[in-house]
Amino acid sequence: MTEPAWVPQSCTLPTPEQPLRVAEWDALFSERLTSLSRPHPLHLRLYLADGEGAEGAGGVEARVRDLAGREGACCSFFTFTVTPGEGLIRLDIAVDPPHAAVLDALAVRTAAARER
């Protein structure tokens, strides 16, 4: 999945910008992902390390919220819930049944980014 071919037709992000968005998600996951689970076929739960880094204090949460907000704006089938905690940020991603395959692809991509 080096190309965003799995991006559904319903995504309104212009095609030239899609690889850049995928790269943003990949960077976030490779830098911050500590664990992931799939509590339901339509629900992916990610835990991201909080703390200072290039983003500065509170910057990781702001980065997650910004990216989730932009993604939700172009792919309205996603529902993102960001929950800050002690040293971790929980990111819940849900989709409707017609977009389960998109969530499947995102879960695979997320796990691969963590391995890098």
Image (cartoon, helix red, strand yellow):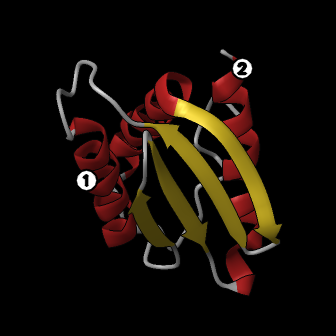
Residue 25 location (% of width, % of height): 46, 39
Q: CA distance from mark 2 to mark 1?
A: 24 Å
Q: Secondary structure at mark 2?
A: helix
Nearer-N-terminus badge (2/1)? 1
> Few, some or many C-alpha atoms within 10 Å of disc 2 (few <14, some 14-19, many ≥20)?
few
- Kind of residue indicated by mark 2: Glu
Residue in the picture at 30% in, 47% down? 61
**From the viewer's perspective, is residue 52 above or below residue 62?**
above
Residue in the picture at 65% in, 84% down? 96
Q: Residue furthest front?
A: 86
**From the viewer's perspective, is residue 65 above or below residue 50?**
below
Compared across the picture, whether 106 is left or right of 55 comes to right
Q: Quadrant of residue 111?
A: top right
Disc number for residue 66: 1
Residue in the picture at 62% in, 76% down? 95
User: How many discs appear?
Assistant: 2
Residue 87 location (% of width, % of height): 43, 39
> Few, some or many C-alpha atoms within 10 Å of disc 1 (few <14, some 14-19, many ≥20)?
few
**From the viewer's perspective, is residue 77 above or below residue 44?**
below
Q: Are marks 2 and 1 in contact (CB under 8 Å)?
A: no
Q: Secondary structure at mark 1?
A: helix
* Nearer to us in this view, 84 or 74: 84
Residue in the picture at 65% in, 15% down? 116
Q: Quadrant of residue 71?
A: bottom left
Q: Which residue is mark 2?
A: 115
Compared across the picture, whether 85 is left or right of 109 comes to left
Disc number for residue 111: none
* Nearer to us in this view, 52 or 3: 52
- Kind of residue indicated by mark 1: Asp
Residue 11 location (% of width, % of height): 46, 67
Residue 101 location (% of width, % of height): 77, 65
